[in-house]
């Protein structure tokens, strides 16, 4: 087998593994209807979605734990509520304007974005406290996400 054939097969194998891995990630998330939710989760969704439009409901399994996510729109802005199997709120992501952030968080996101354009910002709330701000960044044709704490320090994921 010549070098070109080996490179082609190696590339093909890498792509196949990537497709399989991506498919495996999505298998842990399942789209649901309100009637599919456990009663305690349904009650939490109904409470959290007052005045909102529900855009989607999902069940996801992460590290062996089952979570439910309600995606909604409130006053034209996105809001995602993550609940555990008992209906307890684990995390809330609210779409916010960049200008509304504390100065340190805004500066931290802008610094981390570099030459990229910040296209969306969300606050991340746990236990009724904003713990981070997440920005979707467009750089050339690529999209990425960055997070900073409220004090503006960058958060890196260890995955």
Image (cartoon, grey):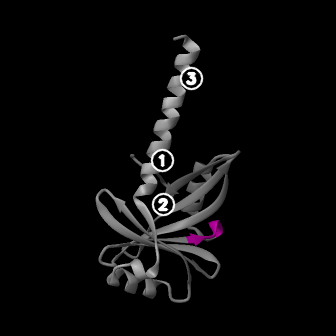
- Of mark 3 and mark 2, the one earlier in the sequence is 3
Label 2 – label 1 distance at C-alpha: 34 Å
Are the residues at dot 3 and dot 1 in contact (C-beta closer than 8 Å)? no
Are the residues at dot 2 and dot 1 in contact (C-beta closer than 8 Å)? no
- Place residue 131 in its image quadrant: bottom left
- Name above or below for residue 22 compared with residue 34: above
Q: Residue furthest right?
A: 140
Say which residue appears at 65% left-offset and 78% top-offset: 76
- Of mark 3 and mark 1, the one earlier in the sequence is 3
From the viewer's side, name the closer residue of 121 and 36.
Answer: 36
Badge number at residue 151? 2
From the viewer's side, name the closer residue of 84 and 110.
Answer: 84
Badge number at residue 22? 1
Q: Residue 75: x percent and y percent? A: 63, 82
Label 3 – label 1 distance at C-alpha: 21 Å
Label 3 – label 2 distance at C-alpha: 48 Å
Q: Residue 18: x percent and y percent? A: 49, 40
Q: Residue 84: x percent and y percent? A: 33, 72
SS category of the residue bearing label 1 = helix
SS category of the residue bearing label 2 = loop
> Is label 3 or label 1 in front?
3
Asked whether residue 124 is drawn in magenta, I would say: no
Q: Residue 52: x percent and y percent? A: 56, 84
Q: Which residues are magenta?
A: 95-99
- Name above or below for residue 7 compared with residue 24: above
Say which residue appears at 42% left-offset and 50% top-offset: 24
Say which residue appears at 48% left-offset and 60% top-offset: 151
Badge number at residue 8? 3
Residue 156 visible? The answer is: no
């Amino acid at each position: 087998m010549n070098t070109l054939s080996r490179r082609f097969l190696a590339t093909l194998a890498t792509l196949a593994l990537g497709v399989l891995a991506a498919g495996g990630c999505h298998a842990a998330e399942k789209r649901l209807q309100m009637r599919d939710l456990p009663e305690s989760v349904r009650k939490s969704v109904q409470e959290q979605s007052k005045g909102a439009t529900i855009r989607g409901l999902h069940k996801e399994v992460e590290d062996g734990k089952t979570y439910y996510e309600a995606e909604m729109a409130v006053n034209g802005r996105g809001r995602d509520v993550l609940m555990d199997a008992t209906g307890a709120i684990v995390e809330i992501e609210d779409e916010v304007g960049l200008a509304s952030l504390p100065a340190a968080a805004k500066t931290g996101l802008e610094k981390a974005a570099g030459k990229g354009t910040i296209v969306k910002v969300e606050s991340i709330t746990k236990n009724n406290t904003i713990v981070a701000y997440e920005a979707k960044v467009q750089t050339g044709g690529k999209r990425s996400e960055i997070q900073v704490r409220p004090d503006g320090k960058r958060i890196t994921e260890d995955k």
